Image (tube, coloured by chain):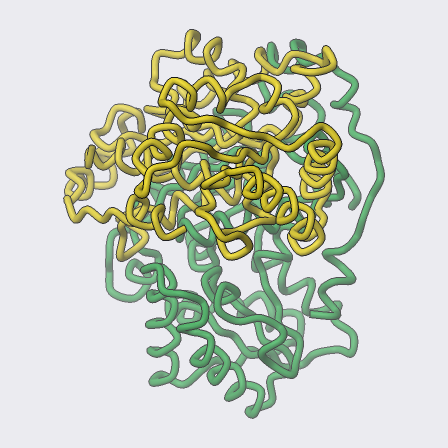
Chain colours: A green, B yellow
Amino acid sequence: MTAMKTRTGVKTSAPSPLFSLPVLERFESDPGSVQRSVVGILGGMGPEATADFYLKLVRATPAARDQEHLRVLIWSDPTIPDRTEALLTHGADPTPALIAGARLLKKAGAGMLAVPCNTAHAFLKDVQAEVDIPVIHMIQETAEYVQQLSPSVQKVGLLSTTGTQKAGLYQSWLNRKGVTVITPDSARQDLVMDSIHAIKAGRSAAAVRPLFTEAALDLIGAGAQAIIGGCTEVPVGLSGNDIPVPFIDPAEILAAAVVRRVLGAK
Amino acid sequence: MTAMKTRTGVKTSAPSPLFSLPVLERFESDPGSVQRSVVGILGGMGPEATADFYLKLVRATPAARDQEHLRVLIWSDPTIPDRTEALLTHGADPTPALIAGARLLKKAGAGMLAVPCNTAHAFLKDVQAEVDIPVIHMIQETAEYVQQLSPSVQKVGLLSTTGTQKAGLYQSWLNRKGVTVITPDSARQDLVMDSIHAIKAGRSAAAVRPLFTEAALDLIGAGAQAIIGGCTEVPVGLSGNDIPVPFIDPAEILAAAVVRRVLGAK
């Protein structure tokens, strides 16, 4: 986690021009039209990961009081069809629900979107095509982050859903940056997927920590110089304290990217 | 916390009629018009408390997989003027911003509203008058919960903002149920308020725990048979493990009340 703190810990003291507007003027206009963008979070995949992501966004925001935090609109729709099932077993396509959610957020005033679900990123191209506000891409942001790690990393281990693994989301973004992605073998991956489902079913972090840790250590033994917690449920049950290499939490990277975009720090 | 678990832990296995609808049919209609209500959360006061409340709502929901969780729309607007300042020092009135937020949530499909901020409840009557969807009242729900505690409670201690304390929110709801509310003296209350601000500024729970604990023990020494964490920031830094009497978290009670309403269990 040491390396990550450097980036997510970036603080800016730039004052928001919004704060000087009178309250009524702000609320008479569409929330999306004011200078500081409203952040739209398309979530619910799963709901606990969405709450966790929002907390990460709050903690990534430089603020000394409530009024300095970002305005955020969250559409948390856990009924969106399962992403992994859609990718692997011809389950219902989540795309229409994702597009409907993105449109709802845009219409309600969101100026950009974040989708705190790795597997959903397999469907994001179609979502981005349907809304004219930027969708901040968690996997792209993570690949850029990995590329900037120092000392440099040539091989990362990925703990994710089987859907994210098979869709090759991290592989395609990281390979073009010269980074190899290794993943658990099929038997171990089934156990990782079971643990992700266990978190979604409300099991405690402690219950899945040993399995996630063992899967990570396996990948480290096979040469991984960092581990990506590539499903929003993984960082619920695994942290940098559990393993001897950097643990990369894409949700934390997405939160920092959103803050940079809104505050114009980058 | 033992007593609370009984109520918040109520599980229902009633299947949602929503799950049998095809995805497209659901999304072609207004989200608010389907049988299972969309929960609107009017939050941001503060933002961390809103994330915490959403997590409590997720954990209060009986669900074995993502798709069984509630659909939730959160408008988190931390720029809403400070509620305590409005009540005590003629600060800007938060009512217009609260009404605008409630209308936004209603328009986007919310079928009911929850406001996870105790002090904001001083302004909720005007908000409820402006939207024709129910606003679940956290303080009313908490008063009903306290009345049902066994063994029965005649005197509770309140740790809250100075705004909530001076507005008499808990006092008026609890007195009519025959329960007396006691609060810290003015010097101690200033320290409680400072700790609430410290949490809002991102200080850790550990930093404020000793002060919250001491304030609670004071009230227990003065006869309080239970402690109400009557500001959403208080349960961030104080738990039932810190004190020898039941610790009542109104956000947890509100979460359980929302789940009961949506699932029709009560």
Q: Residue A140, position in %: x, y?
A: 60, 58
Q: Residue A35, position in %: x, y?
A: 71, 25
Q: Residue at x 62, y 62 (%)?
A: A142
Q: Residue at x 75, y 32 (%)?
A: B187
Q: Nearer the viewer, residue B160 or A262?
A: B160
Q: Residue B177, position in %: x, y?
A: 36, 22
Q: Nearer the viewer, residue B157 or B36?
A: B157
Vertical order, A118 against A156 (above or below): above
Tell me how many marks there are: 0
Q: Which residue of the protein is positioned furthest toward the bottom in this rendering?
A: A221
Vertical order, B7 against B30 (above or below): below
Q: Is residue B113 visible?
A: no
Vertical order, B159 against A220 (above or below): above
Q: Residue B199, position in %: x, y?
A: 68, 43
**Quadrant in the picture for the N terminus of chain A:** bottom right
Q: Residue at x 40, y 68 (%)?
A: A161
Q: Which residue of the protein is positioned furthest toward the front in this rendering?
A: B222
The quarter holding residue B201 reads: top right
Q: Residue at x 75, y 15 (%)?
A: A21
Vertical order, B25 against A128 (above or below): above
Q: Is residue B204 visible?
A: yes
The quarter holding residue A217 reads: bottom right
Q: Nearer the viewer, residue B116 or A236?
A: B116
